[in-house]
Image: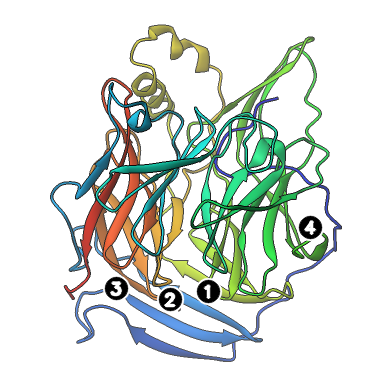
C-alpha cells in the first residue's frame, strides 16, 4: 500500500491512554495584535486554563494584508532544463539555508544533498545512492532539518532512518527507527537532543470489491538520542486516503481534500495536531498540553463539482480521470488550512486552504506566542519550504515540469 504526504510513517511505540482534562476558565486578557488602536485589525484573546495557555484569534479581513513585503521576483533561482547535471533537479521537495548562507537541496532523484552558495552556484554534492555510511537509499533524502550543534539532518522515511551531517559534509551518524508498517520518520530535534518522531500504523485493507475513504492512524512520541521512547504523545488520525480493495491488493490514493495530522517543533514545545479545525496544540517535552492556538474559521463543505474540477485541473491530459472519481465520497468539510511553517524567528505561518486555481495564496502569520499578526500573500506557483528573517525559500515546477529552488526576499519592516 502506498502512502503519500510529508512525514507519516509507522514505528510501534508504547501507548499511554491519556484523556484530555476539561479546561476550566481561570482568566483572560484581550490583546490587540494588529491595528493596536482598536480598529479593524485582527484581535487575540489570551487566557490561562488549568495551566494551558489558550490563544483565541479573530480572522483577519480577507482584503487586508500585513505590511511585510515579498520581492517581485526570485532573488536566487537554482535549476535548469538541461546543461550542467549539478543544476538538473529531480524529486526536490525541500531546501534549507545554512547559517553561512549556503543552500542545501535534497535531490531525491540522485540520492544526493546538493550544496549551493548564496547566489545559487553549485559548490559540492554529498552522499549518493548506496548502502554505505552517508549514502542514501530508495526515494531519499526527502527533507532536511537543521540539527543542534550546527549540523544537518536528512530524512529517509522509507528506510526508517535519519542521517546527520556536519555543515561541511562530514557524515556523523544514523538513527534508525523500529516500525511494523515499514515507514517511520523523525520530525525534528528538540534543544536537549531528544527528537520528535511519527509513525503510521499498519493498515490491513478492507473487503475485496469495495472502496472507501479511510484515515490510518499516526503515532507520535519523543525519543531519546539513541531511539528509545522518552514520552508517548498518543495516536492521531493521519491523512485521509481513498482506498480501492481488490482480491490481489489494496490500492490507496491521496484524497483531493484530505484532512491530515501534522507535527513540528516550535520553540521549546512540540506540536501535534490536525487540520480538521483551525487549532494548533503544543505540548511540553513531558507530554503535557501547554498551549492551544485557535483562529476563527468558517467551515466549507466540498461539492461534487469541486471534486470534478480538482481532478480535471490535476490531470489536464487525462480526460477519463474525472470518471474514475465518480463514486469517490465527499468529506464533511474542507481542511481548515493546508500546512504550517515555523520561521527562523519562531513565528507560525499557516497556509490557508485553497482550491486549485484560487488566488491569491494567503498565509496567516502568528507571533511566537500564537497571537495573529495578519495575512501575507505568497507567489502562487511557489511551494514554501523555509522562511528566514529576510527570505522565503521554496520549490517550483514550470509548465514542462522542470524543477527549481527559489529564494525570495522578505521585508518585515512594514507594520
- Up/down of 52 relative to 305, above or below: below
Which is more foreground, mark 1 or mark 4? Answer: 4
Direction from residue 230 to residue 409 in the image, left or right:
left
Q: Which quarter of the rendering shows the C terminus?
A: bottom left
Q: How many marks?
A: 4
Residue 227 got which mark?
4
Residue at which label 1 appears: 267
Which one is earlier in the sequence, the residue at label 1 or at label 4?
Answer: 4
Residue under circle 3?
Answer: 42
Q: Nearer the viewer, mark 2 or mark 4?
A: 4
For residue 81, side relative to residue 256 (left or right): left
Residue drawn at x 28%, y 23% as measured from the top left: 83
The CA distance from mark 3 to mark 4 is: 42 Å
Marked residue nearer the N-terminal end (3 or 1): 3
Give the class, few, some or many, for how many residues have Cα within 10 Å of label 2's Cα (few <14, many ≥20).
some
**In this figure, which residue is indicated by the disc labeled 2?**
368
Amino acid at each position: 500500500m502506498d502512502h503519500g504526504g510529508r512525514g507519516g510513517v509507522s514505528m510501534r511505540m508504547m501507548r499511554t491512554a491519556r484523556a484530555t482534562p476539561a479546561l476550566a476558565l481561570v482568566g483572560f486578557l484581550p490583546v490587540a495584535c494588529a491595528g493596536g488602536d482598536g480598529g479593524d485589525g485582527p484581535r487575540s484573546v489570551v487566557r490561562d486554563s488549568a495551566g494551558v495557555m489558550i490563544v483565541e484569534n479573530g480572522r483577519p479581513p480577507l482584503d487586508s494584508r500585513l505590511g511585510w513585503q515579498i520581492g517581485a521576483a526570485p532573488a536566487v533561482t537554482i535549476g535548469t532544463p538541461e546543461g550542467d547535471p549539478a543544476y538538473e533537479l529531480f524529486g526536490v521537495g525541500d531546501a534549507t539555508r545554512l547559517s553561512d548562507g549556503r543552500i542545501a537541496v535534497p535531490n531525491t532523484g540522485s540520492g544526493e544533498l546538493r550544496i549551493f552558495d548564496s547566489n545559487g552556484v553549485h559548490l559540492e554534492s554529498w552522499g549518493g545512492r548506496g548502502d554505505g555510511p552517508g549514502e542514501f537509499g530508495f526515494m531519499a533524502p526527502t527533507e532536511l532539518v537543521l540539527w543542534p550543534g550546527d549540523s544537518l539532518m536528512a530524512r529517509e522515511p522509507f528506510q526508517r532512518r535519519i542521517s546527520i551531517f556536519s555543515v561541511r559534509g562530514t557524515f556523523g551518524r544514523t538513527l534508525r527507527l523500529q516500525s511494523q508498517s515499514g515507514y517511520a520518520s523523525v520530525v525534528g530535534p528538540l534543544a536537549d537532543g531528544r527528537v520528535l518522531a511519527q509513525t503510521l500504523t499498519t493498515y490491513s485493507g478492507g473487503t475485496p470489491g469495495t472502496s472507501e475513504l479511510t484515515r490510518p492512524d499516526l503515532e507520535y512520541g519523543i525519543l531519546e538520542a539513541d531511539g528509545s521512547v522518552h514520552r508517548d504523545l498518543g495516536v492521531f488520525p493521519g491523512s485521509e486516503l481513498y482506498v480501492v480493495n481488490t482480491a490481489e491488493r489494496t490500492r490507496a490514493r491521496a484524497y483531493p481534500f484530505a484532512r491530515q495530522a501534522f507535527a513540528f517543533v516550535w520553540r521549546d514545545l512540540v506540536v501535534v495536531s490536525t487540520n480538521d479545525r483551525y487549532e494548533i496544540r503544543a505540548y511540553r517535552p513531558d507530554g503535557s498540553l501547554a498551549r492551544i492556538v485557535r483562529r476563527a474559521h468558517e467551515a466549507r463543505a466540498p461539492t461534487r463539482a469541486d471534486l470534478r474540477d480538482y481532478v480535471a485541473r490535476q490531470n489536464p491530459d487525462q480526460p477519463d480521470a474525472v470518471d474514475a472519481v465518480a463514486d469517490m465520497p465527499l468529506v464533511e468539510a474542507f481542511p481548515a488550512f493546508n500546512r504550517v511553517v515555523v520561521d527562523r524567528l519562531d513565528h507560525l505561518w499557516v497556509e490557508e486552504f485553497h482550491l486549485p486555481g484560487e488566488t491569491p495564496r494567503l498565509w496567516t502569520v502568528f507571533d511566537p506566542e500564537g497571537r495573529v499578526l495578519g495575512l501575507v500573500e505568497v507567489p502562487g506557483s511557489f511551494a514554501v519550504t523555509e522562511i528566514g528573517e529576510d527570505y522565503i525559500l521554496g520549490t517550483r515546477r514550470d509548465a514542462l515540469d522542470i524543477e527549481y529552488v527559489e529564494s525570495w526576499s522578505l521585508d518585515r519592516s512594514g507594520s
